[in-house]
Image: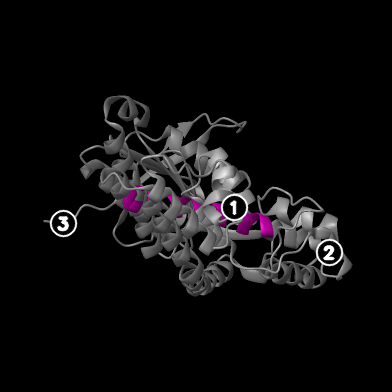
């Protein structure tokens, strides 16, 4: 029986259908990429036949191994594979499932080697940070594809074959180009991370503590904006805010730690830089046609260093301070203000006492801003 007959028997192909020729071309295209009949049937059941093209490109060629086989080869035992995959934010691979490639073997060997140097628990923590970052990159890649290529294909009424070809082409770029770009950018980020480590006290204060400025900036009336504006306008406004935050923080040698809804958390190596970042973002929000304004909270002191995050009382203080700030205002604690007062071009306003959640005594906070230019 020829391939068309086989596919007809599997329910993948109907020679009498209006799109029979197109379906046959799609199936042949996917088979050329390495699809098995079982994969074709499952992809059709899930309504993902066109998307299978991208999955096949990302998967690459074999050989393929089960976790049990890798354990027998001495690469890593089954339980270690499970712990690594879960730490990376991935579903565990069944012990008998042939899903692991030679690339996975290399990654597992690197994990085992690193564990002998740094300890398995610490490397698992690092893996969690890497996994979270890569999950965000992966989601961003799908947003990029969906907002551009897929959107154009949908508007043009493209066929499933054209979708499959686009998925495959896009995935080929992910395989061939993105890892090199990430590797290059990663080393630049390491350089700046080392600078922050040294600026925060380095080994003198211990690996778990760093002395930096911590800041939170929070969009004002974002809930009302969500209800008042069309979805596209909201997305454009929030994207513009995130872009500007990333640019401004980087320009002042800081780092965006994370975005939490309509709030951005960042660190900076000097108090003056932290103020400049917050004030610049306040100005951006005031001038943006859709945003309703922004407020900021800043603090300085010992931050407890996590794997890609920061914790501790100083972080809590800045997080509470931003909620006390008025629209267009940036509030700072005593430690940060003490350094800002000597900075050229910045001004400290009159202090106010605030009852902050989690703090027993009232906390004094000062508004800080850029000094108005003289006449």
Q: Nearer the viewer, residue 290 or 362?
A: 290
Which percent across, then down, holds residue 235?
Answer: 33, 40
* Res 170 quadrant in image: bottom left
* Res 227 quadrant in image: top left
Q: Residues within 10 Å of mark 1 (few under 14, many from 20)?
A: some
Q: Are the residues flagged by discs 2 and 3 in contact, CB closer than 8 Å?
A: no
Counting residues from the N terminus, which is met first, the one under dot 1 or under dot 2? 2
Q: Which of 53 and 27 is in front in this view?
A: 27
Which of the two marks, 3 or 1, is nearer to us in this view?
Answer: 1
Q: Residues within 10 Å of mark 2 (few under 14, many from 20)?
A: some
Mark linked to residue 374: 3
Which percent across, then down, holds residue 63?
Answer: 70, 69
Secondary structure beneath dot 1 equals helix
Separation of disc 1 and disc 2 at Cα?
A: 28 Å
Total count of labels: 3
Separation of disc 2 and disc 3 at Cα?
A: 74 Å
- Residue that mark 1 sits on: 132
Which percent across, then down, holds residue 207?
Answer: 69, 64
With respect to residue 373, does 182 lie above or below?
below
Secondary structure beneath dot 3 equals loop
Which percent across, then down, holds residue 223?
Answer: 37, 27
**Which residue is at a point 46% across and 49% down the rendered structure image?**
50
- Residue that mark 2 sits on: 69
Secondary structure beneath dot 2 equals helix
Question: Which stretch did the figure color magenta?
Answer: 127-149
**Residue 146 drawn in magenta:** yes
With respect to residue 177, does 209 lie above or below?
above
With respect to residue 72, does 37 lie above or below?
above
Q: Nearer the viewer, residue 35 or 103?
A: 35
């Amino acid at each position: 029986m020829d391939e068309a007959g086989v596919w007809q028997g599997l329910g993948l192909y109907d020679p009498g259908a209006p799109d029979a020729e197109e379906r046959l071309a799609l199936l042949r295209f996917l088979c050329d990429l390495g699809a098995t009949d079982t994969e074709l049937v499952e992809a059709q059941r899930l309504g993902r036949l066109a998307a299978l093209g991208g999955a096949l490109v990302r998967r690459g060629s074999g050989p393929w191994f089960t976790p049990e086989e890798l354990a027998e080869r001495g690469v890593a035992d089954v339980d270690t594979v499970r712990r690594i995959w879960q730490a990376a934010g991935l579903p565990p691979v069944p012990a008998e499932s042939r899903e692991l490639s030679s690339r996975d073997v290399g990654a597992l060997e690197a994990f085992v080697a690193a564990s002998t140097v740094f300890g398995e628990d610490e490397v698992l923590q690092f893996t969690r940070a890497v996994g979270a970052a890569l999950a965000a990159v992966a989601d961003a890649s799908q947003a990029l594809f969906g907002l551009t290529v897929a959107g154009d294909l949908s508007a043009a009424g493209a066929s499933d074959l054209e979708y499959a070809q686009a998925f495959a082409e896009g995935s080929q770029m992910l395989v061939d180009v993105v890892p090199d770009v990430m590797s290059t950018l990663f080393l630049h980020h390491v350089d700046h991370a080392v600078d922050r480590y040294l600026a925060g006290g380095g080994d003198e204060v211990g690996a778990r503590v760093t002395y930096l400025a911590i800041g939170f900036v929070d969009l004002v009336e974002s809930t009302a904006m969500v209800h008042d504006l069309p979805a596209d306008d909201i997305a454009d406004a929030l994207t513009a805010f995130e872009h500007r935050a990333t640019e401004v923080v980087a320009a002042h040698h800081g780092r965006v730690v994370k975005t939490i809804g309509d709030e951005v958390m960042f660190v900076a190596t000097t108090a003056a830089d932290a103020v400049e970042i917050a004030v610049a973002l306040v100005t951006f929000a005031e001038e943006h046609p859709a945003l309703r304004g922004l407020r900021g909270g800043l603090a300085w002191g010992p931050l407890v260093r996590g794997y890609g995050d920061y914790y501790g009382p100083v972080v809590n203080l800045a997080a509470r301070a931003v909620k006390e700030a008025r629209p267009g205002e940036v509030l700072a604690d005593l430690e940060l203000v003490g350094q800002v007062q000597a900075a050229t071009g910045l001004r400290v306003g009159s202090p106010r006492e605030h009852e902050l959640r989690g703090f027993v005594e009232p906390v004094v906070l000062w508004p800080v801003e850029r000094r108005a230019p003289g006449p």
